[in-house]
């Protein structure tokens, strides 16, 4: 078992931020040695039922919760949320290999939650500005306007007024 | 009036549970109504009896008077408590209850007629000598009428639903070009929230305070007021935090507003719990805004500083009881309420329904949680996203602020996004701490209220994320190797504790 | 005295969390100490910092003064709050804190010397003119000495631990033949609870009331009392339910007992929170029983009726502050506390440690839960089985009784057995409802408090059991057949609701 | 799938009580028809996460929790607990077949929880009365005396003073 691994973590709140290397070594018994910025921290990490973690770092006690999938993880600690993209070297190499093709300029606007389409403001071929309203979704008695993530041309419109949509349904594509 | 034995609560979520709690204390049976989306809701489970009243959309269930009345008949309920929202301000429903021989726990239909439709309420208040915000006398038939009136009044204006409150169906309009889309949105929200899409407009006062007076009337003509609530912390005209006493109200102003509120209620023969809302401008002039002819979401702060159970009083006067006391009482200490929503403040407060995986609510000294959810519950996407109201009491405002911060720190909701961090930043904001905030406060400070990163916590989070990743990877490898997860027994933490020497200390 | 910045709480469970809550509100950092059995305990998780102080048995962790002081030194704590039990009444520990330059949040060692050892306290109280229960002047060296004294005093007698309270190390002895085994049991319990096996004896008063006065002193010589608490609902000398005001105390008697309690505290130079316990006989004579020189388990009921945060006051006077007011205050309304234990009342209150699978604590108007556990937590088998204190407030005793019943109905603890049903039967008992219960009440009414079957609920349970068995069997068959569990989607409950016609109605 | 089954339930609080027959029929969609004492009840039984059940019987709403293994189940409803021995006909036949040998007169006293043995009052061969103290176990700061479940002779003593015992450990056998 790899008892010592280096992870690379990028704080997703910082645009174009550097990935920080963090070395983790299992000491057994729920204890880990973590090396970060040249300091070595001894970490006691206890996984509780329901997935919460009680972490004691050199006497400091933290309740930590995690939410995420793949390499992206949201860390909830003392009421604050920090989002990281975190992976070890092997994963990073795999990701680099997989990223040969990516539609850089194409942006999909999806339904952020189940709801009803009450208004569609654009049609295929329209030119839109970044932040311009595209679709209004009603859910939980609130109307939510979805905006263009970038300036460009509308290439696909799947949203239809008066219809119900599921969470994650593709609504509009801007290119 | 007849003695009540069984109460049907024509509502859902936290307020249904809140009402049933008092019914239970008073030895009254309770009946829940639920839509198909609420079969597993807390109020359905909390009640002694529960009856399905239709499909998920409110218009097909909670707002269908016949379904509610059928449920009452079928279960033998003799009274109906409407909560807030839904049918609570529907005079037609009050008449239907009267006709069916059911006690409606709220004001008589006539008082609701006079106050429920907001344009009529304004006219009645002008007659009673109560100061009102300049605006329309009646709802508009068309957007063009509205446009003409708005041009006369001058922008900015507020579009408002005539049929209800709670921030639904409200839109601030800055200029004529925005009126049409605001009109459409306000009408559609009003219809879905109140089943009535009538809309009117008012002059928009610049950065006023929203201060409301709780009043209570009995069927013997007595009306008293139970002090004010400060409700200026609003976004999209939706209250987020409320407190009492208001930091800007002197005892003189309290007495003056209380007197006007009582006069307003008496002028329409009001019975039961009601709230007279005022806007207070920077010179501390106050204007009648509207009257909510039902229990208010934020009633717990009044309960904290008066010791009164307002629902118990509602049931008492609904049975013909005289108000327990007839003199105004001074508020004792200070109370603050924050509303916990299933929503994401960082994406324009997008609602975030879903399964609550884990829930731990705050408690301890002088902390109250009024919640309509439970661990394992799935918040449906058909209704208001408020999942809980957290309220605290303390002898002083400063202590109450410290207490609500502490309580918010204790709140754990996993599985869905909530506004808990936003609320924490709100109560920590220096202007809020100083009590100096108007209805524009949340809008102006939005970015700051989303919060900033604490370098110390980012470091802790980074360490946690790395160890977490490592634990997951160890677990996977153990599974691949056909081994048990292992490595966590054996050495005693006590024996290893000696190895914890110096290192990273908190500053 | 120095300003406190960081408080180490030398305790565990609910009281450690309770103390930390106030520290957090006051902006003070907190340090938890934990035994190996408490790595996952709530107090370990709640604190800003946490230090392991040894193996599970208290004698090897929470009672080891050096480990506690090391933890304070290591984390830079400047004050120690002892909670109740453990080292809270250990004068030697107070001296060790003084020597280490740490503020001990409690009375000075001299006051503890005078009051902590109970036989010395009795002698001091006699000197101060306070009435005491007839009994020993000093602990006994041997069981034969005790036998001789008991013969003189006459049976029944009470054996008591000199070193601590809370019902630990106490035994009622009916006749000489039982003395020896009771002596052994009391000494062993006393040693394990307080690290001191000294035992003395007192005349057993027949069915007295146990009423205690909360006092508070500051370092400027001021002492006030904060009214009484009625604690007669006890089993095995362990309090189960407490309330204030006491149903048997008049305002005259309150004033008289308060005056004596203040005199007792002043006579020993008392500073901080303390409780003077009295026995009150059927003629309403009262006798000094002992003084608890620390915060009491049942302090929340006093907080409810006074609005005071007693822990905040403790921190205030520990820093040299003057008491916020110096006149006695009248209790406002009524408060009741019930203690929730992980134990099975039907098997002689056998403790029931284990994993809490699901937890839902009551809330709503004027309900407070002080809990030391959480869903998913495993209650260890090394410590006191109390998992939570539930307390309520209401304007009157009758309303408070209804509220505590309602709150107990809401309590859900799955995975371990608790005394919640027993508590419900207790607060529903007619004698308790009338306020007419002495310290023998729970013993006499034991069988009734275990509860009887409700035919209506047995029927519901039977239906539930059968449907449950059917669901399990369907699930198994589905798995065997390789099918999904199925059958729960398709038809809408709304469409099928029409089929629910008449049938079994609740009487 | 057997959509209609008859179960036989015995309330364990009633000594020598009769088993009550209860017929359950699946109506689909979480609905069941339950026939008991000649009445037919329509039951809406919703299993929630964490195993709790919300049961609506002809408009009456009950929160029900279950705890048990095998055929013995404790049902918690509105704060009260009722224990049943419940099985269908097939199970009852299986149980009858399995019950050929059962040591009627032999009673085992086991540790009801983990703890420490602080006192053993009996030795092999002692005659004891029903209710007589046999062993004292200390756990959670409380001493608990375990008593003889019947009058008889002590045939086995596994408890030893000063030792720790696990939950369910056999301590004493009385015959």
Image (cartoon, coloured by chain):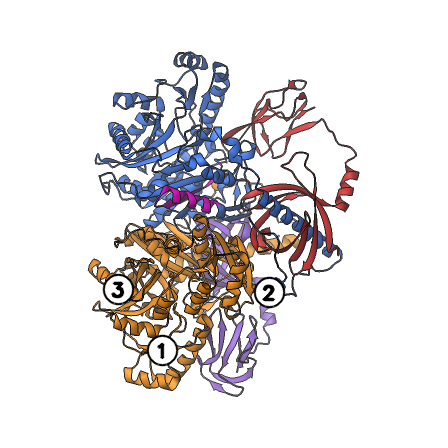
Chain colours: A purple, B orange, C blue, D red
Q: Which residue is rendered at x = 47% and y = 61% of the image? A: B10
The picture places residue B297, in percent across and down from the top left corner, at 39, 61
Give the chain letter at badge 1. B
Q: Position of residue C53 (x, y in %)?
A: 45, 38
Q: Secondary structure at mark 3?
A: helix
Please, what secondary structure does the residue beneath circle 2 have?
helix
Q: Give the label, 1 or 3, closer to the camera.
A: 3
Task: Say if residue A60 shows up in the picture.
Answer: no
Within-10-Å neighbours for mark 2: few <14, some 14–19, many 20+: some
Q: Specify few, some or many for label 1: CA neighbours under 10 Å numbering under 14, 14-19, or 20 or more.
A: many
Name the residue at 41% across, 73% down: B169
Residue D164 horizontal/vertical position (percent): 58, 30
Q: Which residues are magenta?
A: C385-408
Q: Quadrant of residue C268?
A: top left
Residue B147 figure quarter: bottom left
> On screen, A49 above or below B431?
above
Which chain is mark 2 on? Answer: C
| Percent of width and height locating residue C242 | 40, 37
- Residue assigned mark 1: B200
The circle on residue B263 is: 3
Q: Quadrant of the N terminus of chain D?
A: bottom right
**Label 2, on which residue?**
C494
Q: Which of marks 3 and 1 precedes in the sequence? A: 1
Check the residue under mark 3 and report the chain it is in: B
Question: Which label sits on residue A99?
Answer: none
Q: CA distance from mark 2 to mark 3?
A: 46 Å
Nearer to us in this view, C435 or C303? C435
């Amino acid at each position: 078992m790899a008892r010592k691994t280096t992870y690379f973590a990028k704080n997703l709140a910082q645009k174009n931020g550097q990935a920080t290397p963090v070395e983790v070594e299992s000491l057994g018994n729920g204890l880990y040695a973590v090396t970060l910025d040249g300091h070595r921290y001894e970490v006691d990490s206890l996984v509780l039922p329901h997935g919460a973690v009680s972490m004691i770092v050199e006497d400091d006690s933290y309740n930590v919760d995690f939410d995420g999938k793949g390499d992206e993880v949201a860390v909830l600690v003392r009421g604050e949320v920090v989002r990281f993209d975190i992976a070890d070297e092997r994963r990073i190499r795999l990701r680099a290999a997989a990223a040969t093709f990516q539609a850089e300029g194409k942006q999909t606007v999806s339904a952020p939650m189940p709801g009803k389409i009450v208004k569609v403001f654009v049609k295929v071929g329209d030119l839109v500005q970044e932040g311009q309203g595209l679709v209004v979704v009603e859910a939980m008695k609130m109307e939510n306007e979805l905006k263009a993530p970038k300036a460009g041309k509308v290439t696909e419109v799947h949203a239809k007024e008066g219809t119900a949509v599921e969470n994650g349904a593709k609504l509009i594509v801007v290119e | 009036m007849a003695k009540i034995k069984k109460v049907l609560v024509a509502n859902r979520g936290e307020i249904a549970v809140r009402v049933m709690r008092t019914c239970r204390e008073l030895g009254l049976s309770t009946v829940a109504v639920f839509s198909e989306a609420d079969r597993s809701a807390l109020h359905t489970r909390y009640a002694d009896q529960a009856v399905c009243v239709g499909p998920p959309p409110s218009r097909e269930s909670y707002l269908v008077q016949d379904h509610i009345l059928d449920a009452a008949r079928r279960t033998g309920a003799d009274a109906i408590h409407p909560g807030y929202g839904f049918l609570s301000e529907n005079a037609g429903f009050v008449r239907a209850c009267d006709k069916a021989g059911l006690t409606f726990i709220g004001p008589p239909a006539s008082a609701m007629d006079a106050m429920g439709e907001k344009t009529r309420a304004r006219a009645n208040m002008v007659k009673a000598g109560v100061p009102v915000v300049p605006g329309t006398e009646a709802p508009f038939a068309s957007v063009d009428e509205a446009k003409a009136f708005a041009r006369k009044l001058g922008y900015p204006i507020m579009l408002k639903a005539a049929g209800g409150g709670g921030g639904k169906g409200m839109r601030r309009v800055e200029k004529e070009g925005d009126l049409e889309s605001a009109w459409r949105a306000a009408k559609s929200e009003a219809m879905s929230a109140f089943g009535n899409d009538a809309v009117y407009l008012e002059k928009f006062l610049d950065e006023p305070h929203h201060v409301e007076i709780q009043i209570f009337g009995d069927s013997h003509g007595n009306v008293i007021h139970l002090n004010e609530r400060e409700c200026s912390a609003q976004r999209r005209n939706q209250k987020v935090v409320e407190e009492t006493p208001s930091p800007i109200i002197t005892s003189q102003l309290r007495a003056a507003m209380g007197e006007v509120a009582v006069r307003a209620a008496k002028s329409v023969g009001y019975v039961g719990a009601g709230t007279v809302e005022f806007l207070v401008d920077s010179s501390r002039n106050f204007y009648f805004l509207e009257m909510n002819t039902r229990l208010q979401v934020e009633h717990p702060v009044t309960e904290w500083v008066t010791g009164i159970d307002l629902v118990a009083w509602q049931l008492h006067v609904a049975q013909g009881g005289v108000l327990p006391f007839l003199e105004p009482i001074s508020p004792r200490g200070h109370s603050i309420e924050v509303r916990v929503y299933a929503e994401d403040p960082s994406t324009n407060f997008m609602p975030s329904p879903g399964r609550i995986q884990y829930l731990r609510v705050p408690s301890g000294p002088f902390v109250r949680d009024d919640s309509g959810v439970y661990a394992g519950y799935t918040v449906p996407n058909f209704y208001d996203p408020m999942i809980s109201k957290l309220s605290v009491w303390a002898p002083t405002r400063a202590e109450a602020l410290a207490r609500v911060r502490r309580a918010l720190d204790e709140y754990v909701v996993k599985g869905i996004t909530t506004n808990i961090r936003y609320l924490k930043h709100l109560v920590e904001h220096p202007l809020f701490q100083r009590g100096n905030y108007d209805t524009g406060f949340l809008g102006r400070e939005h970015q700051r209220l989303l919060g900033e990163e604490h370098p110390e916590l980012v470091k802790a989070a980074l360490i946690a994320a790395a160890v977490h990743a490592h634990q997951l990877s160890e677990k996977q490898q153990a599974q691949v190797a056909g081994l048990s997860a292992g490595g966590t027994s054996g050495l005693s933490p006590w024996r290893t504790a000696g190895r914890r020497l110096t290192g990273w200390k908190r500053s």
